[in-house]
Amino acid sequence: MRRIPAKDSIDSYRHEQRGVAVAAAVSGPEVRLAVVSRSVRIVSINVNGIRAAVRNGMNDWLAEADADILAIQEVRATADDLRTALPGWEIVNDEALAKGRAGVAIASRLAPVDVRTSLSADPVDSAGRWIEGDFDIDGETVTVVSAYVHSGEVGTPKQEAKWGFLDAMEKRMPQLAAERPLALIMGDLNVGHRELDIRNWKGNVKKAGFLPRERGYFDRFLGEAGATVTGVDGSVGTGLGWIDIGRRHAGEVDGPYTWWSSRGKAFDTDTGWRIDYHLATPALAERVTDYRIGRAPSWDTRWSDHAPVVADYTLGL
């Protein structure tokens, strides 16, 4: 996504960016930059507080990651704090109403051309939990969403807030796909969709994060577009056709997990949850060239309790 500088005195200029060539040719005094595809690295990460993450080594990781766009959740800080924590990045954010809680942001090397923070016209607790950014990448509009779904708690208002948020997502997702064919919803969605997504799934079927009703939303989110989908909870609805990039890439295997409890030795034994996602429209899903979980090598080298979710997309076609 980095722009190629103009060269006034060369016959050709060739730039390699992760294996994607961008050529420039001279005609008279002007340089014509070829519009060709390039690899854009997009990362989602729940930072568990941006200031703590930076103190614990986040920027060292970023220096090696070569990311172009970051979708950040659980920022728990102001816009000024974000700019201090991430110098040199273009940053847009939405803060939670309660200080020090939630918060989402998008940081990028190229400023977005449009930003939206309203998930729904209906009343829904989405402050600090949903932000959309449109990016013009060599003439293609790509929409990136950083989302932070409520964690929920069975039998409490926290779970009611989660149901409301998931309802609003289910309404927004088909609208977004229709408006912007290249769209990507990322973040800590606080639901393990399938048994493969939680190591200890049997012990969590009655707990927030793996409730059948929560999983039923994801059955519809990821079900065939327009098809009638029966969820694991018995609910019936319409499939929205979004693609779970992580599951498509990993296949039918346990995990790979993105979050581990601080209890016991969950990280050391890889007793985790896969609750951080890249959900892409079908058109964008076909542009994925690589995907990985940036799991820390050891418990004491982590800078968040979540691992970054990293994918490369070919854009600017």
Image (cartoon, grey):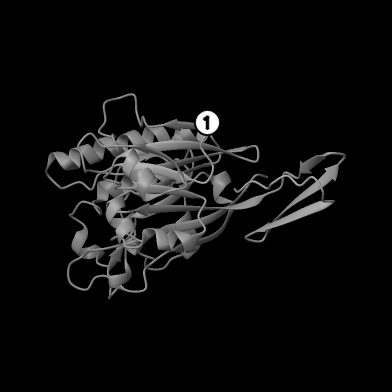
With respect to residue 126, does 10 lie above or below? below
Mark 1 — residue?
Answer: 179
Query: Could you say which is closer to the camera, residue 247 or residue 296?
Result: 296
Q: Is residue 305 left or right of residue 61?
A: left
Q: Secondary structure at mark 1?
A: helix
Mark yes or no: residue 147 visible: no
Q: Is residue 184 left or right of residue 314?
A: left
Q: Residue at x 31, y 51 (%)?
A: 50
Q: Is residue 129 left or right of residue 293?
A: left
Query: Could you say which is closer to the camera, residue 307 or residue 253?
Result: 307
Task: Tell which residue pokes out farthest to the top in this image.
Answer: 121
Q: Residue at x 17, y 55 (%)?
A: 206
Amino acid found under the numbered disc labelled 1: Glu
* Residue 305 on image: x %, y %: 28, 61
* Residue 104 on image: x %, y %: 34, 42
Count numbered badges in the picture: 1
